[in-house]
Amino acid sequence: MTSRVGAVVGVLLLVTLSSAAAFVAPRTNAFRNRVQLHMGVGTALKRVKDSVLSKERSREDLKIGIAGFYDRSSKLWEDVWGEHMHHGYYVPVDRTDHQQAQVDLIDEVLKWSHVGEDDATKPKTVVDVGCGIGGSSRHMARKYGSKTRGITLSPYQAGRGNELAKEQGLSPDLVSFQVADALDMPFDSNSFDLVWSLESGEHMPDKPTFVQELLRVAVPGTGRIILVTWCHRDLKEGETCLTRKEEKLLAKINRAYYLPKWCSVNDYVELLEKNGAENIERDDWSHIIAPFWKAVIRSSLNFKSVLGLLKSGFSTQRGAYAMFLMLRGFNKGLIKFGLITCTKKAE
């Protein structure tokens, strides 16, 4: 594989250098332009090579890439699927009201996590970690009257979330969104009754710090953490790692979605236990959200979606292709839709 990539990159480099030679001129500005051209081409070629090889990104590259990816793709998703940027709850399995299925997923996860069972478990304050354009935040603010704060790395998402809140008659005091890093949240410790993370944990390059931050901002004793995230399967007895084929498939998905290395639900449980979390529960809802994959793929096969995808740029197009890789991983039992909830230990 490496030799083939090297050959392709080498040919591209020769072609580029030959073409660039036509710009040679004795003037200084022409020379400077040529140097800049070579630098730009070199950067582009490196990105192509890294993409083909599914090279793991650095933490800073991930942070920049995640923000850019969602800046470019969120409008397309909203145009096709609405304000909720997550999967749906497919019970019964043949339901076709996909946007309502997304809302139902929020409610069913809350119910599974014992939130709202009585007045004592209704959250007054919520932080939505990796909020997208704020669908979950606004839903919970309306459902419970809770003061909700959402954070995302994407300036577009934060801005759009605030726009939608205003359009829906929700004041900034009740619901607001800002650009912030989940690994260093701009909130005081012991601030939130509910710490909610729906399909954002997979983006976190430092899982121990992520778990520590989730617990840090939760209210001691009663503060509940809900983590719903894509994970790889738990390792079997005697295994020390995934198979080479499994790692290779996940690496391809990582390049498309700006993801770091994956972990298992069991890894998260161990981190929570290490940090003193209590009342830990877990579940696997892979079968419940499974129909959503095919629904998303079908939704992309119409003129509006195709046109939007063409306009959205390469990274969004690559992300659309990666949906098929995710589906393959899911069908092989490699990729799991994990639910974890717990409470913070009383001080």
Image: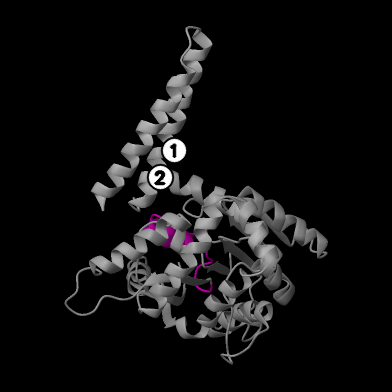
Is the C-beta separation of discs 2 and 1 under 8 Å? Answer: yes
In the rendered image, residue 47, in percent from the top left (x then y), is placed at 41, 43
Indicate the amino acid at tag 1.
Answer: Ala
Q: How many marks are shown on the rendered structure?
A: 2
Residue 189: which numbered mark, if any?
A: none
Whether residue 194 is visible here, answered yes or no, is: yes
Give the residue at x 79% y 63%: 170
In the rendered image, residue 200, in percent from the top left (x then y), is placed at 51, 63
- Determine the image quadrant of residue 308: bottom right
The answer to whether 38 appears left or right of 301 in the picture is left
Give the residue at x 69% y 65%: 303
Foreground: 212 or 91?
A: 91
Residue 48: which numbered mark, if any?
A: 2
Q: Does the magenta stretch include residue 324?
A: no
Foreground: 176 or 237?
A: 237
Residue 44: which numbered mark, if any?
A: 1
The answer to whether 221 appears left or right of 70 in the picture is left
Indicate the amino acid at tag 2.
Answer: Val
Foreground: 41 or 71?
A: 41
Rendered view: 253 above or below 113: above
Graded by Cα atoms within 10 Å as few (under 14), some (14 to 19) or many (20 or more), the crowding at tag 1 reads few
| Span shown in magenta | 205-222
Rendered view: 293 above or below 172: below
